[in-house]
Image (cartoon, rainbow, N blue to C red):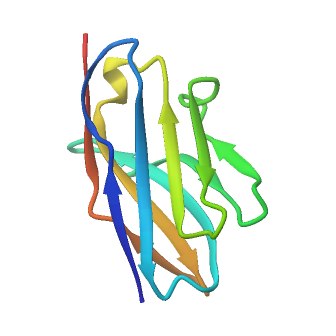
Amino acid sequence: QVQLVESGGGLVQAGGSLRLSCTASGSTFGIGDMGWYRQTPGKQRELVAAITSEGFTNYADSAKGRFTISRGSRNNAVYLQMNSLKPEDTAVYYCNVQRFGRATWGQGTQVTVSS
């Protein structure tokens, strides 16, 4: 099994930046796609950004040009650099990894952007 620990969330003013980190431990061999999702109360969890094991990236339209996803060289970490943050980016952000067809989620980290 894979365990994920997220960090880096917090309170920031609009226009500021945050860097989220997600570290994988346990059975990390075979980790493929990694991604960040976010969720606000009453809404479905949505994809923010994803990165394949080959380094190909995919972003939600709301994240394009502001957020950058990257992964560690040993495929045991994924990061989300968030710039020019907006109040509508306020959410709980979750890390997700795919390994042999199974998805694992982190516990979530709160990001709050004040106007």
Q: In which quadrant of the rendered image does the C terminus lie?
A: top left
Q: Please determine whether, in this image, residue 102 is positioned above or below residue 57.
A: below
Q: Please determine whether, in this image, residue 52 is positioned above or below residue 85.
A: below
For image coordinates 42% across by 58% down, the residue present is 22
Q: Can residue 44 be seen in the rendering of this structure?
A: no
For image coordinates 48% across by 52% down, the residue present is 36
Horizontal side of 103 relative to 100 (left or right) equals left
User: Percent from the top left, x then y, of residue 38?
Assistant: 38, 46
Q: Please determine whether, in this image, residue 109 is positioned above or below residue 82.
A: below
Examine the image and state in which quarter residue 42 appears: top left
User: Percent from the top left, x then y, of residue 97?
Assistant: 52, 69
For image coordinates 44% across by 71% down, the residue present is 24
Q: In which quadrant of the rendered image does the N terminus lie?
A: bottom left
Looking at the rendered structure, the number of numbered marks drawn on it comes to 0
Residue found at the very far front of the displayed protein: 73
Q: Can residue 14 be seen in the rendering of this structure?
A: yes
For image coordinates 63% across by 29% down, the residue present is 64
User: Percent from the top left, x then y, of residue 95?
Assistant: 42, 59
User: Percent from the top left, x then y, of residue 98?
Assistant: 56, 74
User: As rendered, which of 74 and 29 lies closer to the eye?
Assistant: 74
Horizontal side of 112 relative to 80 (left or right) equals left
User: As rendered, which of 32 and 26 lies closer to the eye?
Assistant: 26
Examine the image and state in which quarter residue 54 appears: bottom right
